Image (spheres, rainbow, N blue to C red):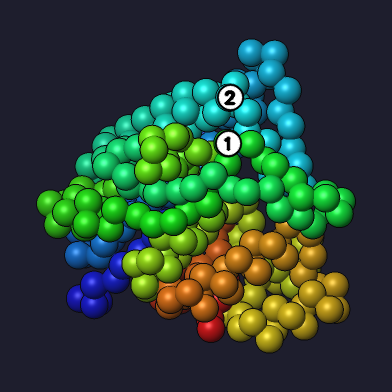
Amino acid sequence: MAAMKTLVVKLGGEVVGSPELDAVARDVKALVEEGHRVTLVHGGGPQATALQGRLGLETRMVAGKRFTDEATLEVMKAVVAGQVNVDLCAALLRNGVLGVGLHGASGLSIQAVRRPPRVMTGAGPDPVDLGLVGDVTGFNLGLLGDLQERGYVPVLACLGVSREGQPLNINGDTVASQLAGALKADALVLVTSTPGVLRDLKDPKSRIGRMREAEFREGVRSGAISGGMIPKLEESFQVLAGGARSVVIVGKLGEGDLRRAVLDPGSVGTVLEG
């Protein structure tokens, strides 16, 4: 049997609503039964945007980040900590996994402070206030560990809370990245819409199995890596610097792919190494 690994798996809202969710859930079951410690983190951006539209609320994005006013925060609480968290826990349950849904206010699972205004790339020279958005300051690692000792899988919605009890919206990738660093995780797995980092965006077979930071920098300089993959990889290499042992970017998962991604690095997706 492979040595026990500590794993953080980040699922986007689009994955929770997709056919591949059951395959992911069955892989989580296999990993837990083999003795690995798994924590799931999820977002819910597509579902939140859809609900805002139905309610007649504007979805305001600033440099790719969601501006969160009081009305938007109510939507995030209803969708991320509610609908998406319940749907994900239900999918785990029907595949034999006991997930426990959590958000920041659940025993201070995700501790945060409100983000001060700051200059953002692509948003002009002036500092930007994103509203009720948080920066992670810590996690209740004891609570997560206690749940895992008893055979449960923590399922964290990307909502933090301040010490004063103010809920705050946080990017799901950021929560997962910070948690992986805090746990010194063996792997942070980012489940995305692409099968990994590609040499040619139009060719899924051009997947890069392993990548170091120097190769990433060269790919940006040459133009081989561009668009939204750049900030994702930037943050991922910061996670490695912060203590996580590896980051795996995967997508379009079939049954067994998630397990192979963490137990046979490089066989599925792209493994980033420090």
Side (left or right) of 264 relative to 44: left
Residue visible at 87% across and 51% down? 124
Q: Quadrant of residue 90?
A: top left
In the image, 27 versus 147, the foreground residue is 147
Give amino acid for label 2. Answer: Glu
- Cα gap from disc 2 to disc 1, whole angstroms: 7 Å
Q: Is residue 193 above or below residue 248?
A: above
Q: Where does label 1 land, which residue?
A: 132
Circle 1: element type: loop
Residue visible at 35% across and 55% down? 139
Give amino acid for label 1. Answer: Leu
Residue visible at 38% across and 35% down? 165
- Quick check: marks 2 and 1 in contact, CB under 8 Å? yes
Residue visible at 58% across and 36% down? 132
Q: Where does label 2 land, which residue?
A: 70
**Residue 131 in view in this figure:** yes
In the image, 80 versus 273, the foreground residue is 80
The picture places residue 37, in percent across and down from the top left corner, at: 26, 62
Going from the N terminus, do you reach mark 2 or mark 1 first? 2
The picture places residue 5, in percent across and down from the top left corner, at: 29, 71
